[in-house]
Image (cartoon, rainbow, N blue to C red):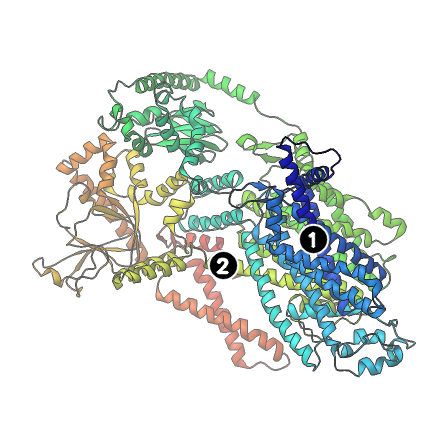
Amino acid sequence: MPCLDALERAVSCCHRSSNSDDVPPPDKQPSRLAAYYRTGAERICQWFLPHSRIRLSWDIFIFLVIWYNSLVTPIRIFIMSGDSTPQSLVYADVVFDFIFVLDTVLHFYRPYVDPNTGQIVTDLKSLRKRYLGSVTFYINAIACIPILKTPLSPFLGKTVQDIVMTYFNVLRMVRILHLPSQFQELKRFRSQKGPVNESVFRMWIILFFTLLGMCILGCVYFGLSTAVVEDVCPSPDSFAEDILGEEMWMADDFVITDVMDPAVCLLDDAERQCSDCPQSLFFVRSVYFLMQTLFTIGYGDSVVPSKSVIEMSLACIFMVAGVFGYGLIIANLTSVLANLDVVSMRFRHEMDALNRWLSFRCTPESLRERVNLCFMYLSRTQHGMLDDALLADLPPHLCSDLAELHLDMVTKIPFFNRSLRSDSFLSRIATSLIRRVYAPGSYILYQVEKQREMVVIKRGRADICIKQCTDPVGSLLPGDYMGDYQLLFGTVNQVGLRASDDFCEVLVLTYSRFEAVMSHPDCSDMMFQARGCNFRESSDQGALDTIERSREELNKILVAISNITTKEKSDKLKDMMEKNQVTFKGFRIQPDSLVHVAWDVFAILAIMYYSVSCPVRLAAYIGSNSLQSSFDMLFILDYAIDVLFLTDMFLRTSVYAYVSYASGRNEVIVDRRLIQRQYLQSGWFPVDFLCSIPLDLVSLATGYYAVYRIPKLARILQLSRLISRLQKNLDECMHVTMNETQMSSLIMFMYSVLIVVWSSAGWNALREGESVYHSVYWAFTTLTTVGYGDLTPSDYRETCYALFVGAAGATFSAAIIANVTSFFHNAEISEDSTEHKLTVVKSFMERLQCQREHINKVEGYFEYIEREQDGVNEDIMLNRCIPDNIKSDMLIHITQSMVLNCGFFASCESGFIRRLMLSLEQRFFGKQYMIMTDSTPADGMYFVKKGTVEILERPDSGRAEAAAPSRGAEGITVGSSSTALKVKKRLEADDSFAEGCLLLHWESNPFMARAADDCELWFLSRSTFNRIVIDFPLVRKLLREREAGLNLVTSNERRASANAILKAAEKARRKRAFFIHPDKHFFQAWAFLVLLVTLYNTLVLPLRVAFFENHVMSSTWVALDYLGDICLLADVVMRGAFLAFYDDNHLVIDRSKIFSHYRKSKMMKWH
């Protein structure tokens, strides 16, 4: 660019002259021109800074210009002839030429961000050098060449001028190569306002280029296929010879030929008007052909390739491109659905797995409700993600910075006072805090139990409870704390702490984390470990202050207890509470009322009625030419539904109470003004207001009743939100869970119905005399991309409509396929999939050349999870997916029946039992695997949760050890014969064995243990047991007495004898009672028989109804029918009276319980 070089040299000279003593003469203009240039260039650079609005607006304008040229240029080249080109398009070409030149020059002044430094580069020389060396410059230069046709056109003839004007525009189309980079610019600008969903953004790009490609390729196809004729728009006299006599698809397309052939369009009864050159119809039919081919619809109507080699070759190319393009759309839609709201979707799938696990563990309703409430709170506050998951990707120093935000709360505690502790010590303490969320009514600390946990209230309120009083004796508010004395001195909790009627967030410092902090070298002067991991008899000022403060708080609690237990004080307190109650006048519908469920169901059905009746009614009236005057009785039903929606608007502004989560409190709002404000600010009100405008009153004067119902279709925007709200209300009001798959399937089904109805209604309105069945049939064949071809468009309007419905139908079919694919993707290809994990583990073990016995054991473990636990990995669920406090509650629920049934821990205190339950380790053993052998001494005891364990002994202890069969503690087969082992005893659910090795180190096991079938055991190791016992002196004393054998054998034997009597009575009752075991071969054979009867009814009955309706039925058919009915009736009786079931690993054989269980199951309504 010579002019730019001259200006740069002028600026350089001006800069050098300013540093010299020679002052240039005032009459020299280059320096002033250079100054003007630099000032203007700098101003342009400021306008076009990255992410500036001017730059974005200019890029959008250039994007639209490129899109216009890419769309119009192929039409002008392949469809329009020179004479028929509108003069406005010629003038627009000249304007766009100058715009492209201006954009090419402006690129010299577009700053950019240096990828190495991240700084914005505005130096003009650097900008010019970068631009001249880029591909963008050459593309822009080629796109500017068409401007030369303006000065050359006066010197060219008419024919040459038309050719130049048309074909020079092709060079402008190279700017299509700029579109991907402009999409990226738009994405970077959009990302400044928030995160951009990559899949959704990529989907828009794919759809844009798909539609643009259809238009360009359609024009190319038309131009190349009609290249055999000189003029596609000949005179009417020569139309039959020039067009119909050629071998090309245009000659066979009756939609085109019927409006050009005078033998057809000039008939007196012809409905089509003659057109010499229907260019718009050429374009629409060409794109229509591309739509059929690319989206694999293939009607097979007149728009098909003829026997021309060019047309068949192009059709084959388009078909291959269509397969890949359609596959790309489906794949990207799958990604869109999987990542549309990946955090919320992940949370919903985890909740589905959690609910399956809670059902598998027979969790009581109270605990299940607490778990669901806790996860609802996490979903509301942090999208259901646990703190560990949120902080996992942050570097340690950022985690420390976030943790130190709680230092002000920690330093209020006497032991952690800033004047006593160093900043590094306080930082380690703050980092060790764990945030927990407790549902209303959940216990945080248990009275008279040694938990050794310090809690600080962060949000909400916690009540102080004691066993002697039913009412709380005090409350802790945000910033208050409890448990510091118990943490430091290892004592039991004097009082209990429970979350009040709202969620309570607390910061917890556990003993294990506190011990880890105290083991740091900087804390050696406190002598925490030397004093037995407590501060008893310590002179530490923080410990002394803690003792003094604990005495004061205990005295306050004692005073509160005495006041509450006094009747006068109790009545006074009751009066005060009644005065503080929130009162309101009028009727209110509570948030958990069943009214919400009933209304949501009605609203969904009403919206579906609106969405179906409105287009069907319009199509029927248009087809009968009675749109203005038609009125039917269904309008009365419409007006009744309108009145109900108006009533709902009134109720939502005054009567519907709602739950507010302001400031972390769970509060039911009943104030009318707040209810009204909440509804008016919600997203429901604008749609409700628009649909409530009484436009139907206008129709009383003007007619067109059906037209004024169209605004009611705006309620379709509420359909998805209504289904989501129904899911929430079903859970809160009826405790009915609608999982993510069911909700997505319902939404997909409803929108599918609407798309079919709307498409068929439009087709029915366009084709006069078309039946409803034919219209629905055409909509199905088009939307599903089947395209039989028996019903096809016959004119311009129908072609445009079929083009739109075909493109929408292809996207609709792709969305359904993608939605189904995403379901299976989440179910089978997830990293948490049992099959996926088994494949990875097997590959890993085979690579390490592990023995086959080990691989079989791993396979048995995963098969057990898939078969018995519905694929839910309990270890992952406990350690990764639920908070610590919920994990503790679930572990206690799972293990309490086993531990409390063990006589070994009969007289131990509750705190010790609780710690014991939380310390058990889950283990699985496959059928016939040895749990204990005589070669490897046991290092802990076992509790049986599920399955049967055989206690074995050798009848001849002197026999060689090698002759004894065993798989070892790790499941490895040692011997080859099992006849040498004798079954001494069989243990079932809630039994335990090997308790003695907790007190004594066994040199050899006094017996062996083997899994009779797949067993779930819980293991307590000796080392864990010893660590727990240290904190419980009374239990330690009791165990010393047991170890010495003082007066303990009798009590243990009595308990064992009582348990044996109860089990013997249960076995005798089972022998006397008649029941069907669900795991026996008889029931499996019976289930197979019922399956055969069901298949018979499913396959044979429709065949007989369809083909044997007028034939006499043979006696064989009748006998088979009655036998099947008797079999199904017997199945109902057997399941309702005799089929036993498992309840928390216990076989239930009581008939009343069997019937109640069957009545509550889902099978009864189908049976």
Q: Is residue 1037 visible?
A: yes
Question: Tag on residue 825?
Answer: 2
Three-letter amino acid code at the position of disc 2: His
Give the class, few, some or many, for how many residues have Cα within 10 Å of label 2's Cα (few <14, many ≥20): some
Q: Residue at x 66, y 28 (%)?
A: 585
Question: Tag on residue 823?
Answer: none
Residue closest to the eye, 961 or 136? 136
Give the class, few, some or many, for how many residues have Cα within 10 Å of label 1's Cα (few <14, many ≥20): some
Question: Which corner quadrant of the image does residue 731 belong to?
Answer: top right
The residue mark sitting in front, 1 or 2, is 1
Three-letter amino acid code at the position of disc 1: Phe
**Count of residue discs:** 2
Q: Position of residue 499 (x, y in %)?
A: 45, 31
Marks 1 and 2, the one that precedes in the sequence:
1
User: Which SS class for mark 2?
Assistant: helix
Q: Position of residue 68 (x, y in %)?
A: 74, 58
Residue closest to the eye, 565 or 702? 702
Residue closest to the eye, 318 or 362? 318
Q: Position of residue 1163 (x, y in %)?
A: 49, 59
User: Which SS class for mark 1?
Assistant: helix
Residue at the right extreme?
A: 268
Question: Which corner quadrant of the image does residue 892 belong to?
Answer: top left
Q: Residue at x 29, y 44 (%)?
A: 920
Q: In the rendered image of this protein, does residue 101 appear above or below residue 419? A: below
Q: Residue at x 31, y 20 (%)?
A: 543
Do the numbered discs 1 and 2 sit on residues whose CB atoms are within 8 Å? no
Tell me how far mark 1 sits from mark 2, CA to CA. 37 Å
Q: In the rendered image of this protein, does residue 1015 appear above or below residue 562? A: below
Q: Residue at x 18, y 44 (%)?
A: 997
Tell me if 950 is positioned left or right of 203 in this view: left
Q: In the rendered image of this protein, does residue 529 appear above or below residue 575? A: below
The residue pinned by badge 1 equals 63
